[in-house]
Amino acid sequence: MATVIHQREKCIGCNYCVELAPEHWKMSKKDGKSVLLGAIEKKGFWSSKISEQDVDVNEKAAKACPVNIIQIR
Ligand code: SF4
């Protein structure tokens, strides 16, 4: 297991994470920021548990994110 963390407030809605890992990310029609599926929020940080096999796509998303607000732990 790993954890994906999204500092959602700083998201600029570029859509890269959604393109690279569509099973884990979607865009919000409400505010134009991305949503980490299944995530729970704590002090502005949204986190979601993922299986090892899903680490790669989320790491790609993290690397592609222009504002560097996706972390994998
Ligand atoms: S790649 Fe980063 S800035 Fe772009 S939509 Fe995803 S979280 Fe937001």
Image (cartoon, rainbow, N blue to C red):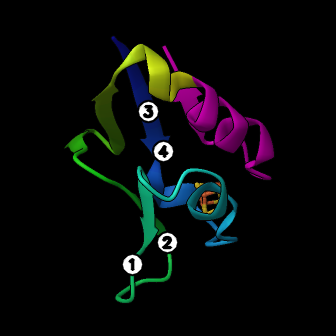
Residue 15 vs residue 7, the one in the foreground = 15
Residue 2 in picture, x, y percent from top left: 39, 15
Q: Which residue is mark 1?
A: 28
Q: How far is the residue under mark 4 from the one under mark 1?
A: 15 Å
SS class, disc 3: strand
Q: Quadrant of the N terminus?
A: top left
| Magenta residue check for 58 | yes
Q: Which residue is mark 2?
A: 33
- Which residue sits at x=56%, y=50%? 21
Label pair 4/3, CB-CB below 8 angstroms: yes
Q: With respect to residue 61, does 17 lie above or below?
A: below
SS class, disc 4: strand
Mark nearer the N terminus (2 vs 1): 1
Residue type indicated by callout 2: Lys
Residue 50 vs residue 10, the one in the foreground = 50
Report which quarter residue 45 is drawn in.
top left
Residue type indicated by callout 3: Ile
Label pair 2/1, CB-CB below 8 angstroms: yes
For residue 7, which numbered disc appears in the image?
4
36 vs 59, left or right, is left
Density class for disc 1 (Cα within 10 Å; few <14, some 14-19, many ≥20) is few
Q: Which residue is mark 3?
A: 5
Residue 9 in picture, x, y percent from top left: 47, 58
Ligand 1 shown in quarter? bottom right
Residue 27 in picture, x, y percent from top left: 46, 74
Label pair 4/1, CB-CB below 8 angstroms: no
Q: How far is the residue under mark 4 from the one under mark 3?
A: 7 Å
